[in-house]
Image: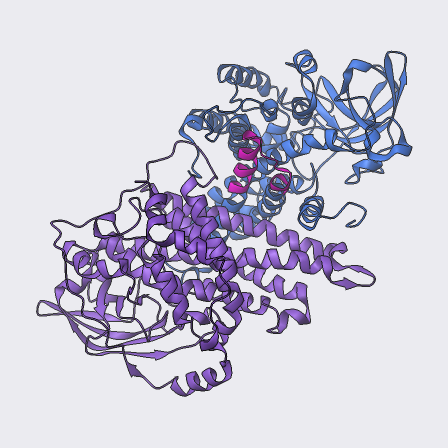
Chain colours: A purple, B blue
Amino acid sequence: MSVADRSMGIGLKALRGLAGWEVIDRAGLRKPVERLIYESSKNGFRTAATAGRTFSATTKLGKPARQAKPSAPKLFDLEPDDEQQMLQEAFGDFAAEQLRPIAQDADAACAAPPELLAQTNELGAAMLGVPEQLGGAMTERSAVTAVLVTEKLAHGDMGLAAAILAPGAVSTAISLWGDADQQARYLPPFTEDEAPAAALAVLEPRVLFDPFELSSTAVRSGDGFALNGVKSLVPRVVDAELFVVAAQVEGEGPALFILESATEGLSVEPEPAMGVRAAATGRLVLEDVTVGAEALLGGASREVYSECIQRGRIAWAALALGTARAVLDYVIPYVNERQAFGEPISHRQAVAFTVSDIAIELEGMKLTTYRAASRADQGKSFAKEAAIARQLVVEKGMQIGSSGVQLLGGHGYVKEYPVERWYRDLRSAGVMEGALLV
Amino acid sequence: MINLEIPSKFKPLVGQAHQVATEIFRPISRKYDLAEHEYPKELDALAALLDGMEDAAAGTGAGAAGVRRSEASNGDGGTRNGSNLSTVLGVMELCWGDVGLLLTMPRQGLGNSAIASVADEEQAARYAGKWAGMAITEPEAGSDSAAIRTTAELDGDEYVLNGEKIYVTSGERADMLVVWATLDRSQGRAAIKSFVVHRDNPGLKLDRLEHKLGIRASDTAAFILNDCRVPKEDLLGSPDIDTKKSFSGAMQTFDNTRPLVAAMAVGVARACIEETEKHLAAAGVEVDYDRPAASQSAAAAELLDLQANFEAARLLTMQAAWMADNSKPNSVQASLSKAKAGRSATDIALRCVKLCGSLGLAESELLEKWARDVKILDLFEGTQQIQQLIIARQLLGKSSSELK
């Protein structure tokens, strides 16, 4: 059965149908002011991580299940295949009709509506990376497909896209690097309707953060590890039932650990930020968290950890592509309609050239991101390509966000228009590490 | 399936071009930078070799004529990697060697690209094997090529051309020029046509050669056309003045040649970056692609930024060529590639000089030469600003009278 057929079978068909529905109920987000008061009173008060479910293996795997890699292409080609085009269309419609209309409210509330997250669970957003053998949808694992889907979701809204995709980072990490026991224990729930909220926590609250020199530590004790540290801007941290956390193994280097939210010593606190607010970011605090050796993901291998960081950077680049494209699509009609000095402002070179520059740099960002993802799919090294894509997001992505506001002038600065949110989100995309994977 | 690697079928061609750049161009780079207006005779043998390469690899040529659009598709509905892509890849390698020398490669002029783009089959065959320069610019008309004043008047079986042309690349060395002239100034751009004028035409007089900032190996000539008689079969494209099609015939050339100029910029930029990487590595500075730029030395962080802009320019150039190979309209993408590559390559070259300090400035190395050479690539075949106008007009749906 083809990827498209299987995907259609498990919810994408529903997704395409949903796109035609009226905007989902916004009731839970109607009172941003009250939510703000609530959040700020909550902010600073640390709470225990959500009690969460108990994960236990329902199937036994002899060896870890991995998705196949796509066959290596022979020719230079920028055309997505039929299945990718189908997904682009479905996720594009979904983003336009379900995400964009609620983006401003979700940003103000620092939360994605639970109904929306439940819907996207049904659609299988968390399971794109889960092997077919464990109930996943895709026989082939494709970072390019993940980039194309992420880009479309972010065109609707970056914060909501991050909230939707965050659990997928955990399922993808366990699919790619988990052993048979870890996979059997943790992956099947991601293919169910009630998939767990989950998050990959890499970033830490410090300047000059370097994911390869972490402040969070994992000290070997007995058969397992004792973990301490603080992770920053973790998406959906309050609700997450499962974490993959990066910590420095003493004397060995950075590594990834699977932590269930009910584990003693884990606490969470909301940490609203400049951008990506709908992802309900927060801190995850580890205080003498004791875990067994089975919590270690990918055997503390440097290659695994590097790959994780690089895939995260590609994911953030993909989000930035979607948001930067939203800026371009928005400013074109705006500068054509806005009149000044008796004609549309688009008749002025200073305005028109700013639009050209957005297009030029956006296209460069897109191609470098696609190349990094396609090299990942081909099993080629992609550290340099991911770093390059990220560098362009940091510089050009932010420039696009700033130009968007500039082109709208005063209108760009007020929340009646979406460009100020894109400005904040595009700054975030160049700072975030981990949290999402392709 | 999305793949942005250089296809393996072009690797031999890229390898050969790189060898030419290393073995032939680089060793004589400085010599012809210093000896401006002297013909690089080393290139004659090379040109013959390149002709052979093109004939052997029919359809995957590395030369200026490689931009001719093919009507044939793959047949299987899959993507096509053809002569547009192989040409930009070849040009990137050769310009990694020396862009000035590439510009003066016999039979590889921009006029050859113009002929390949708009000539009919009979003309293409008739001009095969000739070297053609491109004569558009006039003292009073640069970017505004619709304002050219050179006139062409039909007299029996001949057109009579009168006017002045400047900045003709390879003007002195080429066998013929593609000269832009108007059939009727009152009818605007629709009346502008291109004509093939042979260099030995008695009505065509070489006025002078320019002294330039860079690309000094390539001659840049000024001509005066005085009752210059051209057989009417040497008019490229249709002789009719069709106001609906306006400029498209002549401008089609640019959709095909802009990615070539972008490729030249990419080649020079890579030379600069590689040279700078080498010097910085000797000083103990290397980019660590895992670590954030802000945690590395300023020089390493800057190098990463140069590489990132280079890569964006390179992929944009490959995209524009790939679209041409697949018969997709690429006017916007051609300008995206030219705009990005032109400005990034200039920026890269100048920042490399800065990073390398005295080694960047001194004539003992080639960096300073590349930083002078590269600036032309943000000027000719449409300046940075012209590319931005083209892009903006298309995105915003504006005419040239609305967005001036």
Camera sees residue B288: no
On the image, the x and y values in percent for residue A305 come to 27, 57
State whether the magenta stretch is mostly helix, strand or loop: helix
Total labels: the figure holds 0
Q: Is residue B19 left or right of residue A143?
A: right
Q: Residue at x 70, y 25 (%)?
A: B170
Q: Is residue A5 left or right of residue A148?
A: left
On the image, the x and y values in percent for residue B322 come to 53, 34
- The magenta-colored residue range is B314-335
Which of these two is toward me, A193 or A78?
A: A193
Q: Is residue B315 magenta?
A: yes
On the image, the x and y values in percent for residue B65 come to 61, 22
In this view, which residue lies farthest toward the left? A222
Q: Residue at x 44, y 77 (%)?
A: A28
Q: Is residue B29 magenta?
A: no
Q: Residue at x 53, y 66 (%)?
A: A101
Reply above or below: A387 against B382: below
Locate the N terminus of chain A and report the quarter of the image it occupies.
top left
Camera sees residue B377: yes
Residue A352 lies in what quarter of the image? bottom right
Residue A59 lies in what quarter of the image? bottom left
Residue A431 lies in what quarter of the image? bottom left
Which of these two is toward me, A411 or A293?
A: A411
Q: Is residue B318 left or right of residue B291?
A: right
Reply above or below: B174 against A305: above
Q: Is residue A307 left or right of residue B208?
A: left
Reply above or below: B372 against A328: above
On the image, the x and y values in percent for residue A121 come to 34, 61
Which of these two is toward me, B42 or B179?
A: B179
